[in-house]
Image: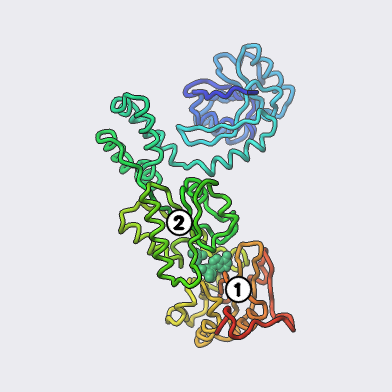
Amino acid sequence: MEHFPLFLDLRGRRVLVVGAGLVAARKIALLRSAGARVTVVAKAAHPSVQAQAERGEIDLHLSTFEPRWLNGMWLVIAATDDEALNHAVAVAAAERHLWCNVVDDAARSSAQVPAIVDRAPITIAISSGGAAPVIARRLRERIEALVAPSIGALTALARRRRAAIRRTRPQLAARRRFYHWLLDGPVHDALRAAQPERAEALLAQALNEGESPVPGKVLLVGAGPGDPGLLTLRGLRALNEADVILHDRLVSDEVLQLARRDALRISVGKTPGEDHEATQRRIHALMLEHARQGLTVVRLKGGDPLVYGRGGEELLALRAHGIACEVVPGITAALACGAYAGIPLTHRGLADRLTLATAHRSADAEAARTESGHTRVYYMGVERLGTLRAQLLRDLPADTACAIVENGSRPEQRTLHATLATVLDEARAHAIASPALLIVGEVAALGQELAWFGQTLTSPARAGATRAPEDGALLAA
Ligand code: SAH
């Protein structure tokens, strides 16, 4: 080991910072968040440091550094841009056997400040010993993403009840089991669900009556539209907690690759010959079966789980069987396709209303409002583009701008710009296929200017392009 990690209790202890520029200001903030009494010596001070001194939060001395400033200090940080001065501080500290960190200067430092993941009272520190701070910071980002914020509250709760846990579980083995139960069981779930009082009550109950078995649960997780960068941090954590992942066909491989390696993965897409209801029954049964074994099941759906994903039905089914559930939203296709095609779904002067609809229900009056200033986004529209277009044309002018975004946010993304008059022919000419989303409204045209991702197709389609057969599976009218 090159460096010995140690966590310092700085509360109420004096720390000297030499320098008062921006770099020093960051260190001062860090030290203060750990409760240190900070003294700053510098020839000049950044206004933010000055302001802290004026508020009496730190002692600021506008003077030159002398070794006597080290009297009574527990730790020293040299954060000036003057190498000779930093060196002098480090030497003076070493003479007194005081730990000294020289910012960005590993060679002169006897102590390193690590990259930190703060889940107080849990602290995770990563150091490269000054060899490559960027690598340490990258690791920090990963850990930051994986460690739930609720772990802090859970640890604090365990600390408050530590004596009771000891009293009720004098045996080490029983105590250890209890802590595992705290982490994996309903107390932590309650904290994650922002219900601290319920967490307290569950803990108190377990102390008196013994811990309940860790129940299985289902997390309904939105995988987003495909680009793994659009998965939420909570979604990523869920994928790493999962014992079983039930995923749709629409979920991209890149997202699945982020999941825990040893999780059981089951693709639950519709199988040939199976009707939608049978698929849905099979999914409900799989969720129940695994959750009842005490497993953590992630039901992973494309986009958002509660937008055209039958997620509501799945929640109801789970509730009916008393299975605990969580929902982690995802970026729905409408938002992703708008963003990745450069189409603002609302835009001052062009659209102040947004409707999400499916082509399956386009006959609804709601779907075809005649007012302008309205953006309509149709899910599952490709197969029924002909019917949908005909219905829209009853209320909207033929030159209404529209766009089809195919494979939104994925490397193969194509955006077709057209009008209601031309969209069907264009879509056929370019052999647009599912998954694709139809955006109708004036804003659609903005995408021609604002496109920044993937391929943009503008009319007219290449002459001689192969036409999909009129009665093809896709684009049937
Ligand atoms: N729950 C999903 C929608 C499921 S319905 C969500 O919130 O996005 C399936 C429809 O979503 C597809 O037919 C298509 O219209 C749309 N869709 C999903 N992912 C898409 C993508 N990456 N690009 C374009 N459309 C997409």
Mark closer to the chain start, 1 or 2: 2
Residue sitting at x 63%, y 84%? 469
Q: Is residue 127 above or below residue 13?
A: below
Identity of the residue furthest to the front in this view? 273
Determine the residue located farthest toward the bottom in the rendered image: 394
Q: Is residue 284 visible?
A: yes
Q: Which residue is mark 1?
A: 433
Residue 161 rendering spot, x and y as whole percentages: 33, 30
Q: Is residue 62 visible?
A: no
- The outermost residue toward the left is 209
Residue found 54% across the figure and 41% down from its top: 144
- Mark identifier at residue 299: 2
- Amino acid, disc 1: Ala
Question: Residue 288 sits in which quadrant?
Answer: bottom left
Circle count: 2
Q: Residue at x 44, y 72 (%)?
A: 275
Using the numbered discs, state the Cα–Cα distance from disc 1 to disc 2 in whole angstroms: 25 Å
Residue 437 to residue 249: above or below: below
Q: Quadrant of the N terminus?
A: top right
- The location of residue 447, given as percent across then percent down, is 64, 70
Q: Are marks 1 and 2 in contact (CB under 8 Å)?
A: no
Considering depth in this image, is 405 or 248 the residue closer to the camera? 248
